[in-house]
Amino acid sequence: VQLQASGGGLVQAGGSLKVSCVASTRTLHDYVLGWFRQAPGMEREFVGRISWSGRYTRYAESVKGRFIITRDNAKSTLYLQMNGLKPDDTAVYYCAADRGTASSHEWNTKDYNAQSEYTYWGQGTQVTVSS
């Protein structure tokens, strides 16, 4: 599976931005999807994830209440809506996918907050928030 992230850009603090990630597969419903980000000089970190059907999401505490992850399996696309952006949100944003078994048990027990659980990665899109 190939992932292509896009939609990044420059935005003022307090603004909003929506980035997308298009997958090369027509069976995106077979994959759990995640967003990660890497700021300059920092380790890549978990942003959020969404279950196979899109019913469940989890977010990092730093973005909870501001960021929303959705997916459109028919369009093979993952989205990250970012609101209330802060300069600390400046980073390259990566989408990631892992096939899994699409079970609630796996969603609740597998550490999909960890980068190591994801097999496929997009190339990243730069988001810069100015103060």
Image: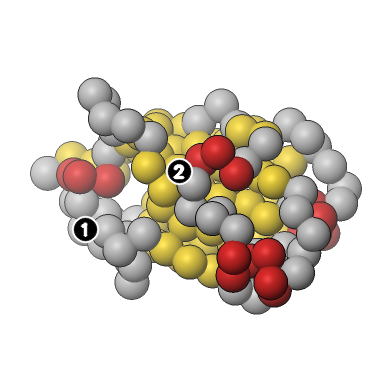
Residue to which mark 2 is pinned: 36
Image check: 122 left or right of 52?
Answer: left
Q: Quick check: 102 above or below 77?
A: below
Pick the front one: 21 or 47: 47
Quarter in which the N terminus is drawn = top right
Pick the front one: 126 or 118: 118
Q: Secondary structure at mark 1?
A: loop
Residue 69 in percent (x, y) is at 52, 62
Extreme right residue here?
Answer: 26
Residue to which mark 1 is pinned: 14
Residue sitting at x 27%, y 59%: 62
Extreme front residue here?
Answer: 109
Does label 2 or label 1 sit earlier along the sequence?
1
- Which of discs 2 and 1 lies nearer the camera? The answer is 2
The Cα–Cα distance between marks 2 and 1, rounded to whole angstroms, is 21 Å
Residue sitting at x 73%, y 31%: 2
Label annotation for residue 98: none
The residue type indicated by label 2 comes to: Phe
Image check: 25 left or right of 40?
Answer: right
Q: Quick check: 90 above or below 83?
A: above
Residue 80 in percent (x, y) is at 50, 55
Q: Residue 116: which quarter of the image?
A: top right
Colour mode of the rendering: secondary structure
The local crowd at label 1, few if under 14, some if 14 to 19, many if 20 or more residues have their Cα within 10 Å, is: some
Residue sitting at x 69%, y 51%: 77
